[in-house]
């Protein structure tokens, strides 16, 4: 009997070992000899057992590629947490626990990590990419709004799509800051973004400055810097920090671009990449055809950055035929054109002005952006609000009188342009849009973009949306009953003006985007109707 029990115990151990994710002792046998210095290696096959050549594999510090035998090997970094692959364009995005799962956790004394990929019938040459910036949830109320407002609109848009859909956040999923630690909110937010809530769309994650765990104030035995120690909780919940994946003719990269200056200050950081990150990106991009569309996802916008490694990253990106940088952080919308082939999209926040309203500080609705990719180019994009009065795709403009009063019990304010001026906030506009004004049904002329200028109070040189500020500051009282007032007096990069020829005319603003879509607005917003700005009560 003892021998039988011993046999069963050994057999169980062997079976368990063979089914392990780490696959350190699984077959088939490796063909390529492992170099003495390499301590991560493995085999990538498809579900039919075919060995897959040309798949990029990484630990977040080194990137390599599988050889003709479908095998890879390299020396792991002491700071690495995961080994993962760059999902090939002809393979499915694997989903586990409701989110993308293309990685395995590195374990001590385990060197072999195999992956099995499921091939698509054909690469998806057309797809939609959903970009969500700054959910920035710190408590149950925020989670509830995200689940009840944002996710249903995403699901609705996904289910209406005629092509496959993929999502990516652009950082600040939660709202840790200083002594306020909301990393425990990461799991609920991960669960909120499950494919079951998104219409089947997998959502990839990018790390933001509020996604750090500031409790570990020094390097530890698994993190050589405090910045690495800060990011560990995010990694454990969401997976790798710096990674890439492929769809159709697009290569998509997600990277952390925040470096804290001190272990005891959550407010002191640079928009920056380390030398190690730069080298990882260089290696990753070395395996990508420069004719591919490159989509580069970060949290803090790269425009006007003056740190050397940001410039080095931009130089790497410029090598590609078409580049779109996706960013968040600012809680306002902005489209910045570097050159004919490189574009940066700065997204309004999902949480708007930190969940106190339905508005970002620049008047852009709480929302997300949808990009249509066909082949190696983005052929269309639009911004979409999520709240009931602003969630229609056609809602892209808000219009004001140039002397409109705004605000409420905490503070009143007024646009400083005079009664004959019409102002139009066109949420997603840039220099490639046409914004025109009609008087009494007749085209009167083109509206003029107001140069970006931030003031603490309204003035005729300000480009701010004082109607939105009037709600966030004047009605809600941000800066009076909490928060810093200037944080809610956000810049606006898409406010247009026009002087009426007939002050009594019926007015209509028509905005046309670069793809020929027309958007119209013929109703002035006033402080007597802040219903669209008012969040629901939970």
Image (tube, grey):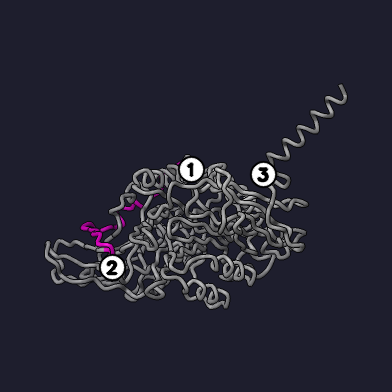
How much space separates mark 2 and mark 1, taking CA atoms?
A: 34 Å
Q: Nearer the viewer, mark 3 or mark 2?
A: 3
| Residue 73 placement, left or right of 494 | right
Is mark 3 in CB contact (under 8 Å) with mark 1? no
Please tell me which residue is depicted at 33% across the width and 69% down the height of the picture.
Answer: 430
Q: Position of residue 362 (x, y in %)?
A: 39, 63
Asked which quadrant contains residue 291, the reply is: bottom left
Number of residues whose C-alpha sits closer than 10 Å to that of mark 3, classed few (under 14), some (14–19) or many (20 or more): some
Residue bearing mark 1: 195
Of the two numbered discs 3 and 1 on the same chain, state the one appearing first in sequence: 3
Of the two numbered discs 3 and 2 on the same chain, state the one appearing first in sequence: 3
How much space separates mark 3 and mark 1, taking CA atoms?
A: 22 Å
Q: Residue furthest top?
A: 1
Q: SS class of the residue under badge 3? A: loop
Residue bearing mark 3: 21
Query: In the image, which residues are magenta?
Result: 513-538
Q: Position of residue 32 (x, y in %)?
A: 68, 57
Q: Position of residue 217 (x, y in %)?
A: 72, 61
| Residue 345 placement, left or right of 419 | right
Asked which quadrant contains residue 415, the reply is: bottom left
């Amino acid at each position: 009997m003892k021998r039988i029990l011993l046999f069963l115990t050994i057999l169980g151990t062997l079976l368990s070992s063979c089914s392990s994710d780490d696959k350190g002792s699984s077959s088939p046998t490796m063909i390529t000899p492992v170099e003495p210095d390499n301590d991560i290696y493995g085999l990538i096959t498809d579900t039919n057992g075919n060995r897959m050549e040309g798949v990029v594999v990484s630990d977040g510090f080194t990137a390599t590629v599988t050889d003709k035998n479908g095998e890879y090997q390299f020396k792991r970094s002491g700071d690495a947490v995961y080994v993962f692959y760059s999902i090939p364009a002809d393979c499915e995005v694997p989903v586990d626990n409701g989110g993308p799962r293309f990685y395995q956790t590195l374990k001590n004394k385990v060197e072999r990590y195999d992956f099995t990929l499921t091939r698509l019938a054909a690469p998806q040459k057309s797809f939609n990419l959903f970009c969500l910036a700054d959910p920035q949830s710190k408590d149950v109320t925020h989670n509830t709004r995200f689940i009840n407002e944002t996710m249903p609109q995403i699901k609705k848009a996904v289910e209406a799509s005629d092509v496959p859909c993929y999502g990516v956040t652009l950082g600040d999923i939660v709202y840790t800051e200083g002594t306020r630690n909301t990393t425990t909110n990461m799991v609920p937010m991960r669960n909120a973004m499950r494919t079951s809530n998104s219409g089947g769309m997998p959502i990839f994650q990018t790390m933001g400055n509020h996604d750090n765990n500031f409790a570990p104030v020094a390097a530890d035995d698994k993190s050589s810097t405090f910045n690495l120690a800060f990011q560990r909780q995010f990694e454990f919940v969401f997976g790798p920090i710096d990674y890439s994946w492929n769809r159709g003719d697009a290569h998509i990269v997600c990277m952390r671009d925040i470096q804290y200056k001190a272990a005891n200050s959550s407010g002191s950081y640079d928009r920056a990449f380390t030398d190690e990150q730069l080298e990882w990106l260089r290696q990753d991009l070395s395996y990508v055809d420069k004719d591919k569309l490159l989509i580069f996802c970060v949290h803090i916008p790269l425009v006007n950055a003056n740190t050397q490694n940001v410039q080095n990253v931009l130089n790497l990106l410029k090598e590609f035929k078409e580049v779109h940088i996706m960013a968040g952080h600012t809680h306002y919308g902005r489209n910045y054109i570097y050159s004919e082939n490189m574009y940066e999209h700065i997204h309004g926040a999902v949480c708007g002005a930190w969940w106190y309203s339905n508005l970002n500080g620049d008047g852009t609705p709480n929302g997300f952006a949808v990009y249509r990719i066909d082949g190696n180019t983005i052929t269309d994009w639009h911004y979409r609000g999520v709240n009931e009065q602003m969630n229609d795709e056609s809602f892209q403009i808000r219009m004001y009188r140039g002397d409109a009063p705004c605000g409420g019990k905490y503070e009143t304010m007024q646009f400083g342009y005079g009664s004959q001026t019409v102002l139009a906030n066109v949420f997603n506009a840039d220099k490639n849009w046409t914004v025109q004004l009609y008087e009494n049904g007749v085209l009167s002329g083109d509206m003029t973009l107001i140069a970006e200028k931030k003031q603490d109070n309204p003035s005729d040189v300000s480009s701010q949306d004082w109607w939105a500020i009037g709600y966030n500051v004047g009605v809600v009282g941000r800066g009076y009953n909490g928060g810093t007032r200037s944080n809610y007096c956000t810049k606006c990069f898409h406010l247009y003006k026009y002087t009426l020829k007939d002050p009594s005319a019926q007015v209509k603003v028509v905005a046309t985007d670069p793809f020929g879509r027309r958007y119209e607005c013929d109703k002035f917003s006033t402080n007597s109707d802040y219903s669209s700005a008012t969040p629901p009560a939970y």
